[in-house]
Image (tube, rainbow, N blue to C red):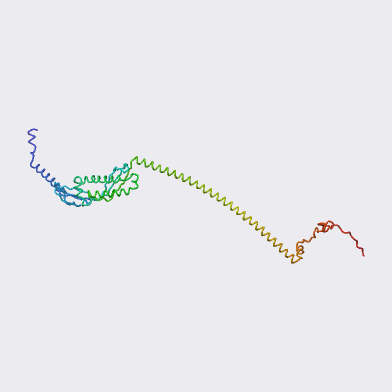
Amino acid sequence: MTESQSSKMPPLNFPSSLGFLKWIAVAIIAIYFATDSYFVVQPTEMAGVRRFGIHSKDPVPPGLHLKAPFIDSVDKLQVSIDNFRIDNLRVYTIDNQSVQISVGITYRIPPDAVLKLLYEVGKPGSASIMHNIEQVISDRTLKIFAKRNTIKISEEREAISSEVRQSVSQAIRERFGLEILDLQIPAIKYSDIFVASVEAAVKAKNDSIAAENTVNRIRYEGEQKVVTAKAEAEAQVARAQAQKQSKVLEAEGEARGIELRAAAEAQGIRVRGEALRDNARVIELTLAQRWTGQPPQTILGNHGAVPFFNLNNTTEEAPKTETPAR
């Protein structure tokens, strides 16, 4: 740069530049103090304030609150109802079978447990709370499943869930002050070996049931044949007895008919005999009633039956006689 060029440039005003930067710094500090001098706690939260390593005696409720900038630290904790879930938790049963389960809890943090959870469980704040709770849930669940038989887990699932809920609720309430509202075991996954053994057992049972059904069917068909044969035999016996009874009744009917006819004939003979005894001309009356208007062909004689008269000669003409004229 030449001497003529340097003489043309305006001189620098260092005091004015430093004053401008100073005001900018003051403004930044003021804004920071203004923004760091208060905090907001949401309706679903409660908070604790730390100052020089000492936390407040009472939890801070929802709302706008003031704090000392650079000095106070605010730790917030959600107190509304929330869910927490552990997946792929491996447990072992009393028969040494491995089972993978999922455990979910629905919980709520009471106001009296806020400071305890923020500053007495793990590190300050809420970062390690769920990690500590997870350990308790896993431990209680393992202990309860260790007393159960694998084959009965599905059958006793509701009872197991109730027992785990009671044990976990008591432990978490005593240690952390949380309130467990519900506990679920939404997933249970058995080992491949156990599943294969169960399927084999189910197949064997189904085959046994099928075989038993076949035996029962054969037995039923045999019993049906026996019943049918017995019924046919009884029917034949019944038909034979009916035929026999029919013949007996028929014979009895014929005998009764003969007896009645004989009695009727005897009665007729007796009546006719009485009639002959009482009236000797009954025979003549009977003959007269039976006569057809023609004379008898034969009569009884000493030499047997002889013609009553010669019917062949009745057609011969008698000799004619002339009547003299007068």
Closer to us: 276 or 26: 276
Closer to us: 301 or 20: 301
Q: Quadrant of residue 145?
A: top left
Closer to us: 159 or 86: 159
The total number of labels drawn is 0
Tell me the quarter of the image containing the C terminus: bottom right
Closer to us: 79 or 286: 286
**Side (left or right) of 203 relative to 72:** right
Q: Position of residue 228 (x, y in %)?
A: 53, 48
**Side (left or right) of 155 relative to 30:** right
Q: Position of residue 120 (x, y in %)?
A: 19, 47
**Side (left or right) of 75 relative to 210:** left
Tell me the quarter of the image containing the N terminus: top left
Q: Residue furthest bottom?
A: 278
Q: Is residue 321 shown above or below 107?
A: below
Q: Position of residue 257 (x, y in %)?
A: 66, 58
Q: Position of residue 275 (x, y in %)?
A: 73, 65
